[in-house]
Image (tube, helix red, strand yellow):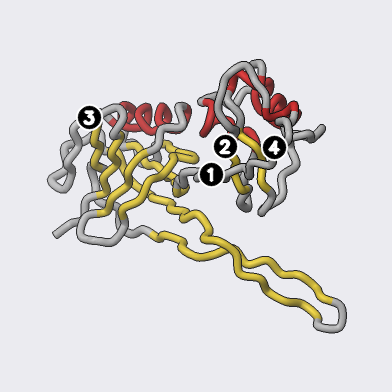
C-alpha cells in the first residue's frame, strides 16, 4: 500500500495529502553535541538537548490525470498553499501513514519548477520540526523587602521566567509570549532584562517575561 504524506493545518481546519507518493524520504534525528577544549584533557564532547528534525521531500504536483495520482487541485494551487504556510509561519502536523512520522513542522522552503513539457510541477519541500517554548515558573521568597523597580508595573502579577535554550532568540521568545516579533517588542524585553544588545543570548540563562504592558509597547 502506498504511504500517504499528510499535512494538517489544524488552525485552518485543512488537510492536504500529496497527490503522488514520493519515491523516498529521509528524516534527521539526533542531539546537539558541543566540542570544548579543556587544558591538559584535550577536546571533550558535551551532549546537549535534542536537535530539531529536518525533512526534505521531493514530490510532483501533476497537471495530467495519471492513474497513480490523487490530485484534487491544480499544480500551482498546491504550490501556493505551501508558500502561504511558509509565509504565515503556519505550524502543521506532518504525518506519513503507517510510519512513526507524526510531528509538528514549519515549511522552511519550497523550490519548484517544470522540466519535461507536460506542465507537471516538480517541487522540493524543506520542513523543520517545530518546538514550543516552555516557560519556567519560579516562586519569589518573601523577605519583607520592598519589590524592586523591575517587579512593579502597570498590571499586577509576578513576571514569568524562561530558561534560554540553545538556538533561542529574543525575537522568537517574544513571538511565543506576546504574539509579536517586532523589533520594538524584543528590544523592550532586552532592556527590561538589563541588556543592551537584544541579539545575544546564552543557553542556560534565565530571563524575565513580564506582561506586555510593563514593556510599554
39 w.r.t. 99: above or below: below
The residues tagged by marks 4 and 3 sit, at their Cα atoms, a distance apart of: 66 Å
Q: Nearer the viewer, residue 8 or 203?
A: 203
| Labels 1 and 2: the sequence-earlier one | 1
- The residue pinned by badge 3 equals 73
Residue placed at 20% from the left, 37% from the top? 71
162 w.r.t. 54: above or below: above
Q: Nearer the viewer, residue 20 or 106?
A: 106
| Labels 3 and 2: the sequence-earlier one | 3
The residues tagged by marks 1 and 2 sit, at their Cα atoms, a distance apart of: 6 Å
Give the mark toward the camera: 4 or 1.
Answer: 4
Give the residue furthest to the front: 144
Quadrant placement of the N terminus: bottom left
The residues tagged by marks 4 and 2 sit, at their Cα atoms, a distance apart of: 21 Å
Find out whether the residues at labels 3 and 1 contact each other: C-beta distance under 8 Å: no
Find out whether the residues at labels 4 and 3 contact each other: C-beta distance under 8 Å: no
Left or right placement of residue 20 versus residue 37 in this view: left
The picture places residue 207, in percent across and down from the top left corner, at: 66, 41
**Does dot 3 land on a helix, a strand or a loop?**
loop
Find out whether the residues at labels 1 and 2 contact each other: C-beta distance under 8 Å: yes
49 w.r.t. 113: above or below: below
Residue placed at 31% from the left, 33% from the top? 119
- The residue pinned by badge 4 equals 144
Residue placed at 66% from the left, 54% from the top? 204
Left or right placement of residue 145 versus residue 52 in this view: right
In the drawing, what numbered circle is on residue 38?
none
Quadrant placement of the C terminus: top right
- The residue pinned by badge 2 equals 160
Structural crowding at the residue carrying mark 4, measured as other residues with C-alpha within 10 Å and reported as few (<14), some (14–19) or many (≥20): few
| Labels 4 and 1: the sequence-earlier one | 1
Find out whether the residues at labels 4 and 1 contact each other: C-beta distance under 8 Å: no
In the drawing, what numbered circle is on residue 137?
1
Amino acid at each position: 500500500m502506498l504511504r500517504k504524506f499528510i499535512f494538517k493545518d489544524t488552525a485552518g481546519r485543512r488537510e492536504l495529502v500529496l497527490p503522488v507518493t514520493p519515491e523516498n524520504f529521509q528524516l534527521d534525528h539526533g542531539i546537539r553535541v558541543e566540542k570544548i577544549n579543556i587544558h591538559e584533557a584535550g577536546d571533550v564532547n558535551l551532549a546537549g538537548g535534542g536537535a530539531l528534525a529536518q525533512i526534505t521531500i521531493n514530490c510532483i504536483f501533476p497537471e495530467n490525470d495519471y492513474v497513480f495520482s490523487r490530485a484534487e487541485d491544480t499544480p500551482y494551487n498546491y504550490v501556493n498553499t505551501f508558500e502561504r504556510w511558509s509565509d504565515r509561519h503556519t505550524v502543521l502536523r506532518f504525518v506519513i501513514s503507517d510510519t512513526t512520522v507524526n510531528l509538528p513542522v514549519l515549511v522552511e522552503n519550497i523550490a519548484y519548477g517544470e522540466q519535461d513539457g507536460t506542465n507537471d510541477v516538480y517541487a522540493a519541500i524543506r520542513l523543520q520540526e517545530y518546538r514550543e517554548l516552555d516557560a519556567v515558573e519560579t516562586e519569589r521568597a518573601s523577605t519583607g523587602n520592598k519589590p524592586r523597580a523591575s517587579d512593579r508595573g502597570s498590571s499586577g502579577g509576578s513576571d514569568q521566567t524562561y530558561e534560554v535554550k540553545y538556538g533561542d532568540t529574543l525575537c522568537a521568545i517574544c513571538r511565543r509570549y506576546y504574539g509579536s516579533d517586532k523589533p520594538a517588542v524584543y528590544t523592550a524585553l532586552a532592556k527590561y532584562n538589563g541588556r543592551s544588545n537584544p541579539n545575544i543570548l546564552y543557553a542556560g540563562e534565565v530571563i524575565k517575561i513580564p506582561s506586555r504592558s510593563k514593556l510599554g509597547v
